[in-house]
Image: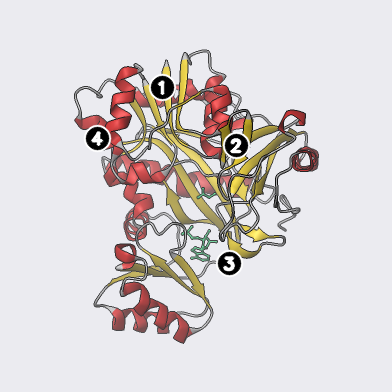
């Protein structure tokens, strides 16, 4: 099969690394990719949001399967574009159509879906511009902290958690007044949930699913989970507090009803479902859905998947995922993200990365890198995810951290406490 992966981060490198191992994979392309994907697949200089360019490339290169990494092209309707075009209908595509991508693209839509299918989540109400007074009245019925969410995609900045009622009321007015543009003309106000977060991923063909290893990402920039949120500073898999009892509840109360709901809604959904979950007093609840794999979770999930991902993906596009079974490695996997100085605020790019050739016992997944001549340069806030396997968490972490010390670029930063004990 000729496979095209859309995207350019650590997630896409990890997907490429796994797909390239499949005997079913003939040619592998990543668009636009990074220095890491360029070393093991062919990078294609096109934007995943330029659907016409994606189409031309797919036809020229006789692509059989497209794997969409990030959410933006999905929310913009790339799957609908493929299915509506007779020239492209023979090509499998991994991702939901635009309507189903609203599970990530609209918080209100996701909450209504969860309500309809009785999937445990925080109690909520939604409000649109013009309903400022009603929103404030609802806030008064809640206790601090107050959770405000812009309905639409807001570059990861659309969720505010505030301690003070008057500040929350002012934010409600500002959001409904267009603080995040159209994304916050509707907002969801919800109950604050206290607990530990974890991530679960399933691949679905809209009827059945295979469940991938559980993971946890470390979202804050600073040690001890302090400072601003980032895209993710590291991840581990498995997760100690997700014991058998919690895992069983997660499958029965959340994953199965979600996939059933996707079927009953007749969503056109062949792709990954990312369940952003929280444990509240032993019970799993959904914080959010995403319609793609997580980053950096993919960098710890893919190394633990022993079975053939490309085989699972092709079964999914043929609607026979029920024949597939994921085989999971019992070893631990950890990843430590090396980031640019200043991230998640402003940072410089173009720093030469050294030491890559000396990495041992590590699977380096490039995030923001690019090749210039024979030099690998930083090209983003998150630069490289240093993944490693081990018989236990400590053994895997020791390898990830040895790798973090082996590479160097000006201003390199990473959290020293990835995997820290959560309970
Ligand atoms: P979201 O974009 O919905 O995942 O929210 C971003 C982050 O805000 C989550 O990863 C949580 O850490 C936090 N968060 C969101 N909703 C809640 C909630 N209801 N209670 C507590 N924390 C939340
Ligand atoms: N790691 C969280 C995300 O990919 O959204």
Identify residue for label 4.
81
Report the front residue among 376 and 158. 376
Residue 39, numbered label: none
**Which of pointers 2 and 1 lies earlier in the amino acid sequence?**
1
Cα distance, mark 1 to mark 4?
19 Å
Report the front residue among 374 and 99. 374
Identify residue for label 3.
194
Q: Are marks 1 and 3 in contact (CB under 8 Å)?
A: no
Residue pushed farthest bottom?
166
Q: In the displayed structure, would residue 328 be above or below residue 193?
A: above
Mark 2: secondary structure: strand
Quadrant occupied by the N terminus: top left
User: Of tags 1 and 3, which is closer to the observer?
Assistant: 1
Query: Is disc 4 surrounded by few (<14), some (14 to 19) or many (20+) residues within 10 Å?
Result: some
**Which of pointers 2 and 3 lies earlier in the amino acid sequence?**
3
Quadrant occupied by the C terminus: bottom right
Identify residue for label 2.
366
Asked if the residue at label 3 sits under 8 Å from ligand 1, the reply is: yes
Residue 171: image location, x then y, percent:
41, 78
Residue 114: image location, x then y, percent:
37, 55
Q: In the displayed structure, would residue 264 be above or below residue 23?
A: below
């Amino acid at each position: 099969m000729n496979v095209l992966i859309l995207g350019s981060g650590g997630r896409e490198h990890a997907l490429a690394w796994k797909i390239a191992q499949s005997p079913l994979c003939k040619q592998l392309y990543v668009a636009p990719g990074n220095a890491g994907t360029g070393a093991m697949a062919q990078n294609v200089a096109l934007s995943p949001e330029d659907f016409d360019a994606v189409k031309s490339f797919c036809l020229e290169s006789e692509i059989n399967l497209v794997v969409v990494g990030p959410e933006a092209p999905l929310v913009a309707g790339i799957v609908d574009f493929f299915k509506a075009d007779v020239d492209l209908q023979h090509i499998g595509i991994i991702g939901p159509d635009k309507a189903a991508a609203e599970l990530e693209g609209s918080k209100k839509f996701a909450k209504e879906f969860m309500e309809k299918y009785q999937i445990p989540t925080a109690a909520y109400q939604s409000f649109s511009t013009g309903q400022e007074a009603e929103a404030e009245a609802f806030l008064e019925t809640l206790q601090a902290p107050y959770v405000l969410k812009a309905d639409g995609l807001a570059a990861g900045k659309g969720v505010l958690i505030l301690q003070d009622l008057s500040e929350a009321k002012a934010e409600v007015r500002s959001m409904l007044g267009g603080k995040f543009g159209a994304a916050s003309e509707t907002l969801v106000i919800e109950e604050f949930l206290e607990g530990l977060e974890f991530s679960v991923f399933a691949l679905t063909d809209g009827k059945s699913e295979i469940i991938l290893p559980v993971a946890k990402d470390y979202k804050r920039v600073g040690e001890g989970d302090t400072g601003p949120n980032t895209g993710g500073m590291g991840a581990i898999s498995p997760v100690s507090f997700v014991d058998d009892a919690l895992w069983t509840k997660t499958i029965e109360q959340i994953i199965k009803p979600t996939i059933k709901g996707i079927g009953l809604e007749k969503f056109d959904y062949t792709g990954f479902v990312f369940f952003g979950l929280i444990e509240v007093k032993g019970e799993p609840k959904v914080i959010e859905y995403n319609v793609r794999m997580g980053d950096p979770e993919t960098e710890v999930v893919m190394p633990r998947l022993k079975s053939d991902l490309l085989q699972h993906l092709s079964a999914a596009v043929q609607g026979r995922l029920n024949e597939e079974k994921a085989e999971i490695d019992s070893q631990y996997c950890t990843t430590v993200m090396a980031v640019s100085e200043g991230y998640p605020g402003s940072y410089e790019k173009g720093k030469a990365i050294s030491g890559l050739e000396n990495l041992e016992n590590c699977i380096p997944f490039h995030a923001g890198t690019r090749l210039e001549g024979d030099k690998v340069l930083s090209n983003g806030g998150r630069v490289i995810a240093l993944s490693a396997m081990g018989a236990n968490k400590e053994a895997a972490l020791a390898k990830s951290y040895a790798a973090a010390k082996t590479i160097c670029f000006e201003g390199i930063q990473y959290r020293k406490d990835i995997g820290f004990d959560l309970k």
